[in-house]
Amino acid sequence: MSGPASDIAMGVRDGSRSAVTVLEDYLARIDAREPRIHAFNVVLADEARHRAADIDALVANGADPGPLAGVPVALKDNMCTRGVPTTCSSKILEGWRPPYDATVVRRLSEAGAVVVGKTNLDEFAMGSSTENSAFGPTRNPHDPTRVPGGSSGGSAAAVAAGFVAVSLGSDTGGSIRQPAALCGVVGVKPSYGAVSRYGLVAFASSLDQIGPFANTVADAALVLQVIAGHDPADSTSIPQPAADLSDVLTEGVEGVRVGRIVDLPSGADPDVDERLEAALETLQTAGAKIVDVEVPAFTYGLTAYYLIAPAEASSNLARYDGVRYGLRVDATETNAMYAATRAEGFGDEVKRRIMLGTYALSAGYYDAYYGKALKVRRLIADDFERAYQHADVLLTPTSPTVAFPIGERTDNPFAMYLCDTYTIPTNLAGHPAVSVPFGTGAGRLPVGVQVLAPMLAEPMMFRVAAELERAVTS
Amino acid sequence: MSTDGWELVIGLEVHVELDTRTKLFSASPNRFGDEPNTNIDPVTLGLPGALPVLNRHAVELAMRIGLALNCDIRPSSFHRKNYFYPDMPKAYQISQYDEPLNVDGWLALPDGTRIGIERAHLEEDTGKSTHVGGSGGRLHGSDYSLIDFNRAGVPLVEIVSRPDLRTSEQSRQYVTELRGILLAVGASDAKMEQGSMRVDANVSVRRPGDPLGTRCEIKNLNSVRSVGRAIEYEAARQITMVEAGDTVRQETRHWDEGDGTTHTLRTKEDADDYRYFLEPDLVLLAPEDEWIDRLRSELPALPAERRAALSEVTGKATDSEAVIVVTERGQDSYVLAVGEAGGDPARALIHVKEAFAAFGDEPAVPAQDLAALTRMESAGALTPTQAKAVLAEMVAHSGGDPEKIAADKGFEAMDTLALETLVDHVIKDNQASWETYCAGQDKAIGALIGAAMKASRGQADGKAVTAVLRTRRSTA
């Protein structure tokens, strides 16, 4: 491996390492394993080589390319990249090249990062295994017969396989944290509004949030600081600068109150539960205080989510109508063209959620479904608020299981939805959360532990995450 | 068919395009008449990943409209109205739904009747489709369609009246008055023929005192005149149906300017379920009190207030044609200026109404020149015919000294003795008319006046001639 992103950037900035050489290391690994893993929808080797050479030239000329100088990154293929296909792993967007960069892409670029490719995902980020891709599944680098999790499975696998140093994913109900856990890397879902959504192809706008994957907590913090901060192009962006995370990682957890949710929905495998207990013990040993808290509405998160997210998705995905861009299947009149285009362009899971969401918003059903789900969402936020009066962070498993075999859950959507039981409530509340690798479970597969924190409490969340990481690596 | 014994109940929904520099949610220019699909960007086209950012100036103009219509400005939100149409790039329109910015206002017609305003809310416009081939510009059956997205995302305010209007004339007045208000507050150029002001009418009929009848919504009203015509046609259609024992179906109807009829566009059963929900890409819009207060204090004088001022100095009724027309043209302040320059405001009002129809709100004739002219008229130094000729000269030269113009033209008012002599000649030369007139046939005076005017080559004052003739008859 080429070491952490922070080391790469430091070396490139001070001229002791060449961005081109660093990149070639990564490209060599892609050449060797990508055909088996299929993390990428597109590898931009030539563009990346040019970019790396430019970075080296900047340094040679005495300029500072920025805090991610020469760091190879991958982008989930639902983030707009100017002139580069952005597909959302859907046939309906195949061939579409955005005329603009997402804010996060621009910020990475301005920080000196080198974009290596765009990664595979469940179509429009709907799924938990990266099997719902029009371009075929991504495989877990730890065991290629298993899924990498999803929907940001390509970005998680790309970091786990050493194809890039860091990557970006998007998390609507766990789509960063769950694949991070299954692939054994760090994955962060920032506070809603901390990172601009401008240029992120929307799945469920009130829940979507972009965040980093990295091999270390420090790298995740480094990337988050680059991409976070107010963006006037996103009205839901929080009007304040990114939190400073550089000093918190070494602060330790002395006196930090860590909550254990006593009424957490059951269903995690014993090997996963065992790792959560071990994590709690680790933190206690490090000086944290373990407290029991109740979050009664946590258990309703999944059902509320599967009304709210599809409802928003049904509206967000209505624009793929064949009129202006992407796939068009011709027909004799307009409505028939819409229907033929959408029937051909969308996969089953996307269609399922569009139908579910359309139904939930329909006249006569709104109050019973979407309206009630919004009330549950409020209850969850209230319950979290009460819990955070007693705890600074909460600890849960990230995923109920380790990585499962490819194909195991594709015919059972509900079993697939259960993957996100522990991650969804955070999105509904808008809070930040991080999945940190914490040893292995069955089959020596990675297990992640999730640290949940209140709104904008990323500094405290990273403190605790760093402590867990120290326990594993020491 | 007669509307006797029937009452019309009319509510108007008026969409106005706001006169902003850029669109409601993006930085593309808001400009009419540009090359198609040039004022576009990722937000306008609804490209994946694009997000709306609310235009502060649009909010300000919407608030000015609300304040001018005596509305309460409330904390408000935006919703998505979901439906598929090729010129709707996102397949949803961002609009205000159950929490509009302006609520509960009123608009006073020139005679003082208050028409309730239910709401005036912000929303984005759609693109514009042109259907080529097939039957008459409709999507159905056309060969192909072209879409211009320049209009997509243009800020609109939809002003919804309460069903307080009772006649087509009131409806015309409402639209005219509203247009005057929109122009006065600078919110829109409000051009119905260009579509920057679009009116839909909800029309129903009932027997006075009965509950409301079933309403039909009439679309495609492109002028104040068509608003009146369409309402009259539609009311007559509904009355004929009800009198024949049929029931009116709730539906949306299209006004055909060509044949002067309305016909079904879609029935209630075909109505889309718009699946409104809170727009998650925007935050709540709650203008702070200081902002509202500042806009209130900056509000210009509105047409009703200006008509009242004009009425007061001219002595003409607030709903007289001259007061309404001159205020509409924005020439009311000019009339007041003539008064301030020592002129006769009532005479000035009539001159401005008749002679300055083709001129903008600030006629080129200096107010003091027109004031001097009206003083000459008041003093009896000019007959109305002469005054018109002098004014035409002043208009042609952007002003001038009326006394000099009158002198150059050889105008001098006839004195009373000369006038009486003239009238006596006329009586002698037109004995037949005179005798008819004396026999009580008042109409015969017309021939005598005409003869007097002719004999004086227009220098005689018609009113003065009439007065002399009357005196002569009473003493005959």
Image (spheres, coloured by chain):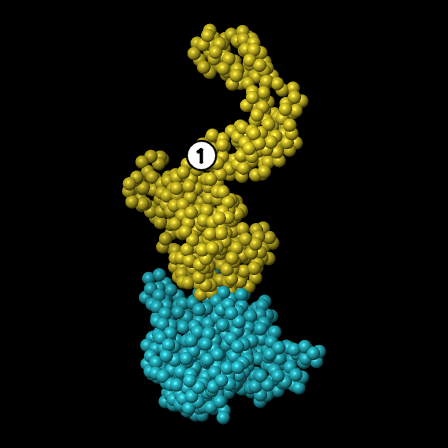
Instruction: Return the x and y of residue B10 as percentages of the image width and height.
Output: 38, 43
The chain letter corresponding to cyan is: A
Residue at the spot 51% in from the left edge and 85% down from the top edge: A250
Q: Is residue B22 visible?
A: yes
Judged from this view, the residue extending furthest toward the right is A61
Residue at the spot 36% in from the left edge and 47% down from the top edge: B215
Residue at the spot 41% in from the left edge and 51% down from the top edge: B72
Circle 1 is placed at which residue position?
B319
User: Mark 1 — on which chain does it sit?
Assistant: B
Q: Which of the 4 image quarters holds residue A96?
A: bottom right
Residue at the spot 42% in from the left edge and 91% down from the top edge: A285
Instruction: Return the x and y of residue B301 as percentages of the image width and height.
Output: 49, 42
SS assignment at label 1: loop
Side of A393 relative to A64 (left or right) = left
Q: Tell me the crowding category of disc 1: few under 14, some 14 to 19, or many 20 or more residues within 10 angstroms, Cα based.
A: some
Q: Is residue A45 visible?
A: no
Q: Nearer the viewer, residue B369 or A329?
A: B369
* Picture colour for chain B: yellow
Instruction: Return the x and y of residue A399 as percentages of the image width and height.
Output: 41, 83
Instruction: Return the x and y of residue A90 as percentages of the image width and height.
Output: 50, 73
Tag 1: amino acid = Asp
Q: Quadrant of the N terminus of chain B?
A: top left
